[in-house]
Image (spheres, rainbow, N blue to C red):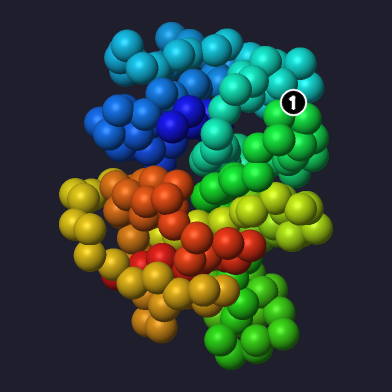
Amino acid sequence: MKILVLGATGRVGSRVVVHALRDGHHVTALVRNPEKMTLRDENLQIVQGNVLNKQDVERAMSGMDIIISTLNTDQTTTLSESMPLILEAMEKENIKRILTVGTAGILQSRTTPDVLRYQSAESKRKLTRAAEEHHKAYEILNQSDCDWTIVCPTYLPDGELTGTYRVERDFLPEGGTVISVEDTADFTYQQITSTEFLKARVGIAY
């Protein structure tokens, strides 16, 4: 499979790349700073570019089968601004499947199910800017025709791969407070061959 990874130098994205290469897939990483990609593999193509540049996105996406975006907000609007460009390029290339990594803040609240977690008392975070940006990206995906899945982890420390965690459609698994970067990457990567969570947000936690 030919996989385009956006955010490949980040914590989750870099681990997704490792999973994909381990299984023999061809991976293209669109990155602003190629020197940050320390991984080298004959099946890894590193393309320098910016997700906010339409031509860069189209160039990187040529010939791909699936898109995995682990872009984070970085206190900017890159996430919501890049999503329309990504979807436009996907349509041009006739690519249907996109996996993204969001935040548990955009899952439904258990205490107030008609709003999202970050909008409710369920969220302990005082600052909502990142969640608002992920919410915008979610709305854009939700209005698209593509087969999207948003993996929504809660608190994300580094940690070992366990392969043992709970997932739930649209909600954070009850009582869940933490999930490692490794296990988040593992679950995200597994979705390339799964249709269980098409057009859905998925909460993930231990």
Q: For this rendering, which residue is in front, 176 or 143?
A: 143
Mark 1, other Cα within 10 Å: few <14 / some 14–19 / many ≥20 = some
Q: What residue is shown with label 1?
A: 52
Q: For this rendering, which residue is in front, 157 or 86?
A: 86
Q: Who's the residue at 78% across and 53% down the image?
A: 144
Q: Who's the residue at 66% across and 74% down the image?
A: 116
- Occupied quadrant, residue 89: top right
In the depicted structure, whether residue 167 falls above or below residue 3: below
Q: For this rendering, which residue is in front, 13 or 105?
A: 13
Taking the image as shown, residue 51 lies to the left or right of residue 38, namely: right
Pick the quarter of the image with the N terminus: top left
In the depicted structure, whether residue 87 falls above or below residue 8: below
The residue sitting at the bottom extreme is: 111
- Image coordinates for residue 147, horizontal then vertical, percent: 64, 53
Q: Amino acid at mark 1?
A: Leu
Pick the quarter of the image with the C terminus: bottom left
